[in-house]
Image (tube, rainbow, N blue to C red):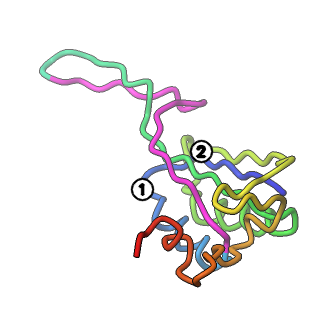
Amino acid sequence: MKKIEAIIRPVKFEDVKAALAETNYGGITVTEVEGHGTQKGFTQVWHGREYKVDLLPKIKLEIVCSDKDAPKLVKAILKSAQTGQVGDGKIFVSDIGEAYRISSGEEGEKVILGTPAPTSKDGRGVEGLFTRR
């Protein structure tokens, strides 16, 4: 399994989300973050005073996928997030050793494959495990 972490411009998020939807990825975690790389921020003038803005708003995407799906997901992110300007972001790919589904205790790659949620003995689904009748 691989974990893909992508830091992108907020204005490119909808484009990236649409590109990922075409790949049938399993799931995604999205976080609003701030930071800088080689872009180092910018200086702006407000009411005659100069201010340095060195932490820029970005979106961080995290996707855990099978080894075979990682290249197509990275390609989709690269193609849809790129403007050609400094500050477009970065993509990091790392290995995932283990994964667990909290609701069922399942282990391994099947937890990222979108398998159906476990059901209770009466067939009401996971929600039914916590609902009184």
Judged from the image, the secondary structure of the residue bearing numbered disc 1 is: helix
Q: Residue at x 58, y 52 (%)?
A: 61
- Kindly identify which residue carries mark 1: 11
Q: Which mark is residue 22?
A: none
Residue 36 location (% of width, % of height): 53, 30
- The quadrant in which the C terminus is found is bottom left
Give the quadrant of residue 104: bottom right
Q: Which mark is residue 89?
A: 2
Give the quadrant of residue 125: bottom right
Amino acid type indicated by mark 2: Gly
Task: Choose between 67 and 98: the one closer to the eye.
Answer: 98
Q: Residue at x 53, y 81 (%)?
A: 124
Asked if the stretch drawn in magenta spans residue 71, the answer is no
Residue 53 location (% of width, % of height): 37, 25
Q: Residue at x 73, y 61 (%)?
A: 74
Left or right: residue 82 compared with residue 113: left
- The quadrant in which the N terminus is found is bottom right
> Neighbour class for label 2 at 10 Å: few (<14), some, many (≥20)?
many
Magenta stretch bounds: 25-46
Amino acid type indicated by mark 1: Val
Task: Choose between 18 and 95: the one closer to the eye.
Answer: 95
Farthest top residue in view: 49
Residue 115 location (% of width, % of height): 71, 76
Examine the rendered structure and indicate whether residue 34 appears above or below residue 17.
Answer: above
Identify the mark nearer the N-term, 1 or 2.
1
Left or right: residue 69 compared with residue 4: right
Asked if the stretch drawn in magenta spans residue 31, the answer is yes
Task: Choose between 39 and 67: the one closer to the eye.
Answer: 67
Task: Choose between 96 and 108: the one closer to the eye.
Answer: 108
